[in-house]
Amino acid sequence: MTPMAPRTRKLLAWGAVAAALAAVFALYTQPAVMVTLADQVWACFN
């Protein structure tokens, strides 16, 4: 197997970062996820 070129590895890393950010932003558009997240944060300090 041939090792990946540094440029290819860098592009794949940026693509993974962009996909993760898109997934997080998609979750923030759903109110139920936001309520659950707020409840979990509130439970940490209660």
Image: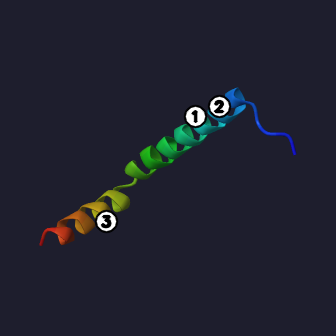
SS of the residue under disc 1: helix
Image position of 19 (left or right of 21): right
Mark 1 neighbour density, 10 Å: few (under 14) some (14–19) many (20 or more): few
In percent of the image, x 30 and y 62: which residue is there?
37
For the residue pair 9 and 35, the one nearer the viewer reads as: 9
Residue 41 in which image quadrant:
bottom left
Please name the residue shown 71% across and 31% down the image: 8
- Occupied quadrant, residue 43: bottom left
Residue position marked by numbered label 3 in the rendering: 36
**Is 22 situated left or right of 44 in this image?**
right
Question: Cβ–Cβ below 8 Å for labels 2 and 1?
Answer: yes
> Where is mark 2, residue-wise?
11
Tell me how far mark 3 sits from mark 1, CA to CA. 29 Å
The amino acid pointed to by label 3 is Thr
Numbered mark located on residue 14 in the image: 1
- The mark lying in front, picked from 2 and 3, is 2
Q: Which amino acid does label 2 sit on?
A: Leu
Instruction: Please tell me whether mark 2 sits on a helix, a strand or a loop.
Output: helix
Tell me residue 46's x, y (percent): 12, 72
